[in-house]
Image (cartoon, rainbow, N blue to C red):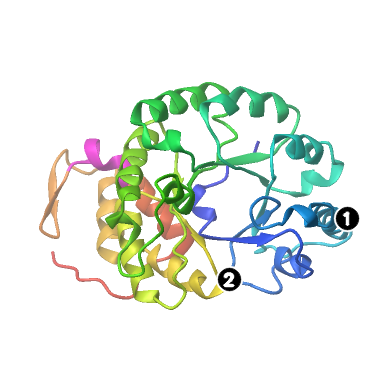
Amino acid sequence: MEKLSPYALGATLYMPATRNDLLAVVCGEKIPQLRSLVICLEDAVAEQDVDFALNNLQRLLLDLSRRERYKDAPLVFVRPRHLNMAKQLVDWPLMSLIDGLVLPKFTLHDVAIWQHLLQGTSLRVMPTLESKEVFDATAMTELAQALQQELNDRVLVLRIGGNDLLSCLGLRRSKNHTLYQSPVGYVIGMLSGVMGAAGFSLTAPVCELLQQPELLRQELILDIEHGLVGKTAIHPTQIAIIHQALQVSLEDYQAASLILNHSAPAVFQHNGAMCEPATHERWARRILERAYWYGMSDVAVITV
């Protein structure tokens, strides 16, 4: 399976499989700045519309097989409603045109099942962590170990389902605070430590407050400080804001380049901070990878 950078995802937009404009979006025509799309057959589709949604997805795949996608067209994933639906989808020959599946409400119990189901396919997976087990650090450590053993090569990222996690507590996001000021803030920090240390990348929960772009920007700063590599977008208007936040400051880019220089000393000072290549190498590689995908921000303060 070809290696794909988690940073390729950027802002991920979810769309119900019932929409009639999916082909234009998938081909990169309707939302050209979009880097990743999830076609949803789960929560975004009413029970009475499931058959229509499945038929619509089949038509989309058939249309895709007859035309060429733009080079910069978004990555495309499908979120099945449940495991039985996933079994049905995997049997469709044209699913090879899709980049992977989003696995909803993923738990330790599901690891071996999905591993068996996906054998013989080239589908990547993005498990979504959104059930009550996610609040348990021990359970997440066990899940990380199981993923390393079974699905490691298929996992592009782990997605954090913020709204479902709040729902587990009978809560809803505040309009005045970032998600980090809720109980889910603990979960994001814990997952960043547990899953990040196990080698997995994570994406940030959606900020569904469309009329508060400044709150989204504040949350993105915290997302990046927690090492998250992308974010779910609720609407196309959020895409540019998310991608701008993923840009790298010139200061960080220069520091990362110096740290990865083969002739760098064991410890050195740059821009008022100590740099230690042995300690900061992984950070530096992530910075350069992010810069490759999103470039550098215009504003940076550099001192020698």
**Residue 288 position within the rendered picture, expressed as x and y whole percent measured from the top left:** 38, 53
Quick one: quadrant of the C terminus?
bottom left
Residue 33: image tag: 2
**Residue 11 position within the rendered picture, expressed as x and y whole percent measured from the top left:** 51, 62
Foreground residue among 35 and 185? 185
Residue 269 part of the magenta-drawn span:
no
Residue at position x 38%, y 48% in the image: 286
User: What residue did someone put label 1 on?
Assistant: 62
Residue at position x 79%, y 55% in the image: 48
User: Does residue 303 appear to the left or right of 257 in the view shown?
Assistant: left
Residue 168's quadrant in the figure? top left
Tell me how far mark 2 sits from mark 1, CA to CA: 24 Å
The part of the chain drawn in magenta is 276-283
Mark 1: few, some, or many residues within 10 Å (few <14, many ≥20)?
A: some
Q: Is residue 145 above or below residue 251?
A: above
Tell me the SS state at disc 2: loop
Quick one: quadrant of the N terminus?
top right
